[in-house]
């Protein structure tokens, strides 16, 4: 349904108890909220737990907006206000995970296979091929660190020790590889697969 | 909203690989909730990470038949007589093109004769100009000859970094006084001089074009001015990259061409 995202009137309607306005607010931020939860907690909590966290996030946003927690006159944009609520809840879950698994290096990137693999749902053959084309253009020294970091799940320190190069250099190579990849994928019009803000 | 974030790609990869602090993550999350460009790049990077996590090294190998598939995919859907018809049409097209190009090339060769005369006189003029220039330039100062060779080949990694010019935006480096960016230095030494905006220790790192570290030195500042002189006994003629780092990150990257002069 096409509509204009009128922030002020939407917030007023939510405060007055309009459930349709609440849905519009979530529809508007849906992709970003889901992304944030996924990015910070994926492979650390199950997909069911992710859904529970999303419900918790939704509830927290509503409670805060309903009691007038968002005040446009303070100069903070609505997007930053919503992001703040989601970030705080996700950070709280992240801290709990750390407390539950004190021995585990929770900050380390993990790509433990989840029975629910979002890749199969999201990535079409065409999209995969574009990414593979971009990856194939990387020099071996960038491929090496990317594979060690993402596929082999090694920390920056482990890669540094294994390759005999400074930690800083490992980070530089990873960052530069991403810069090249994103540049190439942008050139291949990869962004066309994403929808914009639902306004 | 036009995104003015300078180090976007670095933030994106660090965010998705859990290398940002809580505070940095919160700040970036507030940003990408408003920024379409960053959010698109984040989703692209997420897809890339997912694919590598899933497929490992084979994620770096695109399908071999990809291009031929896309061009001739429709042939699979044709019936046999249609395929024969297509092949016949292709043969006819090749013949037509062959004869058309053959006639063109005969005409061209006649036209070329007219131009060749003009070109040869122009070439003679250019040759004489080059000769004059070469005579005017003493052999020892022939910069074009001096700046050639593998030691002057640009390093793509650092070239990109210089062009990106993101690191100098941290604000810790107030002004770089010497050497100027991409400067050609014909001397027996190179002076590195820059002014800091805050009093903190920094490191100067000098690398050759193959990323071999030539010098790495911790610098103290004098009234926020840092300086260091590299003598010609430490380097050969070539292209060099240099960077200023603090304990957290690279603050500045630049390059210079050095031609040794005793």
Image (spheres, coloured by chain):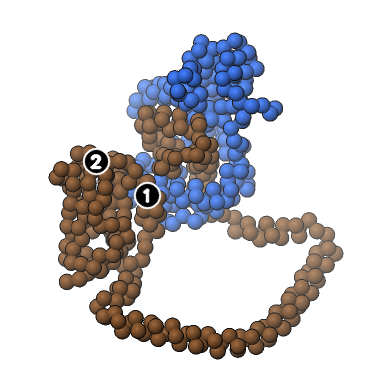
- Number of marks in the image? 2
Q: Residue at x 63, y 14 (%)?
A: A19
Give the chain coloured brown: B
Q: Residue at x 63, y 48 (%)?
A: A126
Residue in the foreground of this view, choosing between A150 and B154: B154
Q: Is residue A58 visible?
A: yes
The x and y percentages for residue A155 are 36, 40
Q: Which subunit holds the residue at mark 1?
A: B
Give the chain coloured blue: A
Q: Is residue B147 left or right of residue B84?
A: left
Query: For residue B138, which quarter of the picture?
Result: bottom left
Residue in the foreground of this view, choosing between A43 and B106: B106
The x and y percentages for residue A62 are 54, 15
Q: Earlier in the sequence, mark 1 or mark 2?
A: 1
Secondary structure under tag 2 reads: loop
Write down the residue under mark 1: B165
Secondary structure under tag 1 reads: loop
């Amino acid at each position: 349904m096409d509509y204009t995202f009128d922030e002020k009137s939407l917030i007023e309607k939510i405060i007055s108890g309009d459930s349709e306005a609440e849905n519009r607010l979530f529809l508007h931020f849906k992709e970003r909220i889901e992304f944030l939860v996924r990015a910070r907690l994926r492979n650390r909590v199950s997909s069911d737990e992710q859904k529970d966290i999303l419900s918790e996030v939704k509830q927290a946003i509503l409670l805060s907006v309903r009691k007038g927690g968002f005040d446009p006159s303070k100069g903070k944009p609505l997007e930053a206000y919503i992001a703040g609520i989601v970030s705080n809840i996700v950070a709280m879950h992240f801290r709990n995970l750390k407390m539950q698994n004190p021995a585990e290096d929770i900050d380390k990137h993990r790509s433990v296979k989840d029975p629910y693999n979002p890749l199969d749902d999201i990535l079409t053959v065409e999209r995969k091929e574009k990414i593979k084309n971009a990856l194939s253009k990387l020099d071996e020294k960038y491929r090496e660190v990317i594979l060690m970091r993402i596929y082999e799940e090694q920390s920056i320190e482990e890669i540094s020790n294994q390759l005999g190069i400074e930690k800083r250099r490992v980070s530089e190579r990873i960052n530069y590889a991403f810069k090249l990849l994103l540049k190439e994928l942008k050139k291949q019009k990869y962004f066309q697969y994403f929808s914009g803000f639902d306004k | 909203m036009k995104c003015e974030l300078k180090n976007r790609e670095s933030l994106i990869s660090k965010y998705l690989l859990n290398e940002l602090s809580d505070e940095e993550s919160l700040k970036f999350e507030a940003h990408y909730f408003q920024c379409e460009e960053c959010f698109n790049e984040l989703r692209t990077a997420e897809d890339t990470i997912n694919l590598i996590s899933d497929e490992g090294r084979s994620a770096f190998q695109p399908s071999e038949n990809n291009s031929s598939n896309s061009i001739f995919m429709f042939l699979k859907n044709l019936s046999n007589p249609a395929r024969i018809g297509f092949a016949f049409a292709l043969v006819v097209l090749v013949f037509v093109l062959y004869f058309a190009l053959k006639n063109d090339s005969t005409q061209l060769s006649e036209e070329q004769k007219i131009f060749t005369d003009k070109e040869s006189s122009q070439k003679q003029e250019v040759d004489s100009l080059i000769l004059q220039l070469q005579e005017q330039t003493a052999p020892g100062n022939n910069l074009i000859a001096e700046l050639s060779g593998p030691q002057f080949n640009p390093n793509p990694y650092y070239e990109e970094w210089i062009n990106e010019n993101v690191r100098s935006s941290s604000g810790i480096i107030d002004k770089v006084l010497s050497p100027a960016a991409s400067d050609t230095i014909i001397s027996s030494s190179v002076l590195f001089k820059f002014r800091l905006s805050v009093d903190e220790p920094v490191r100067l790192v000098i690398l050759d074009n193959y990323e071999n570290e030539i010098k790495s030195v911790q610098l103290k500042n004098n009234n926020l001015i840092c300086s260091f002189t590299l003598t010609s006994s430490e380097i050969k003629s070539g292209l060099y990259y240099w960077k200023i780092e603090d304990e957290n990150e690279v603050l500045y990257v630049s390059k210079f061409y050095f031609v040794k002069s005793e």
